[in-house]
Amino acid sequence: MPTRTLPPVEPYIPAPPPTEHLDYADLPVIDLSKPVTAELAAVARDAMRTYGFLYAVNHGYTPSQTKRMFDIANIPFEHVSTEEKQAYAGDIKATGSYQGYKMRSYWHIDNGVHDQLEHYNINRDITKKQHPQALRPFLPEIEAFAKHCHFNVLHPILRLLAVGLDMPEDAFVDIHKFDAKGETYVRFMKYYPRSEEEEQKTNNVWLKGHTDFGSITILYSQPVAALQILSPDGTWRWVKHVDNALVINAADALEFLSGGVYKATVHRVVQPPPSQRGYTRLGVFYFAMPDDEVVLSPMQEREGRRVGASTMEAWRRARTSAYGKSELKKDGSGVDVEVINGVVVKHYN
């Protein structure tokens, strides 16, 4: 059978690696080509309990496939006009959904400064919405990418995390169905450099420390150093780029479902080090969430740090609508707080 010819795409040229010595987080590595065993599950469990972050390698995508996905990810930013972007922008606050574009300057960061990042979000069911003209030839590849992330990355990680809690292997998988009602999506995201005045007003923070609201976030590693995690000792540490690796982190829904064993990880984005300033930062993500009707309460009897009671749909709509738009209160320790559906949500400056 003849091989389908892929449509041509303009190559995206990433930034060179940073030359500075940075204080990197020492994160565990999971090999996804290995079968689920109690030993490997213990590694994943301890990583998510201690850091909430890990690297995944041998995930089934070759370096050339990953590069092509970054090339495709650049299309909605560089090959779509501002007018067309506006036509495909999501009504985020009203709908509680990120589907479509989030335009630059939508979120307030600090001291009157708004964000300089835009992203384009595509539901795992690519037919749910229309897409910009330039992206349409690549939709079959994006759909295949979503399925790869879901079945070959998300589900193996969820199996390891379930076994790590002595739960049935498919306990988490069964509530993360690909064809269920929900908002799990592919995100292409691009950060743009800011002015020195904006950097001073925000203390070089591009996105405040926060937790994601789904269950698992899958980030395809890229070379611009900007992502930091709040380590267990209270220190912000950089996440190092690893060629063709995935950066996996736990989010709110997983913390609720695990009764607080797996911690939704606090992470932020800051100005890159001097050797990388002036470059854009392109990201490729898969944001996974349980099916919409799943109630976010512990699946086992445990003493949880944070206990959810709403459905996944109610939680993700509330978090999406509020982020970057709600009035936050200071708690006296440099943390801004808000209460969403009865749960305290923190934003770290």
Image: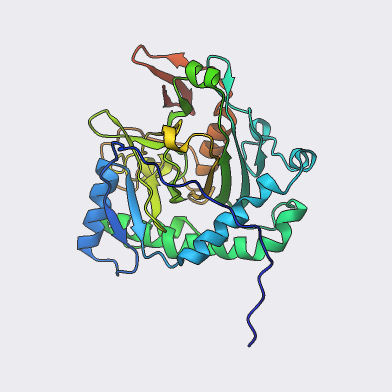
Residue 166 visible somewhere in the drawing: no
| 261 or 110, nearer to the observer | 110
The image shows residue 285, relative to residue 278, as above or below, that is below
| 162 or 153, nearer to the observer | 153
In the image, is 254 to the left or to the right of 327?
Answer: left
- Residue sitting at x 41%, y 42%: 251
Q: Could you say which quadrant of the image residue 42 lies in?
A: bottom left
Q: Position of residue 258 (x, y in %)?
A: 33, 45
Q: Position of residue 33 (x, y in %)?
A: 34, 69
As drawn, which residue projects farthest toward the top?
A: 332
- Residue sitting at x 43%, y 51%: 221
| Quadrant assignment for the N terminus | bottom right
As drawn, which residue projects farthest toward the left?
A: 39
In the image, is 77 to the left or to the right of 322?
Answer: right
The image shows residue 152, relative to residue 54, as above or below, that is below
| 210 or 60, nearer to the observer | 60
- Residue sitting at x 43%, y 58%: 154
Q: Position of residue 243 (x, y in %)?
A: 40, 56
| Quadrant assignment for the C terminus | top left
- Residue sitting at x 56%, y 23%: 195
Q: Total label count?
A: 0
The image shows residue 57, relative to residue 208, as above or below, that is below
As drawn, which residue projects farthest toward the bottom?
A: 1
Q: How is the image coloured?
A: rainbow
| 41 or 14, nearer to the observer | 14
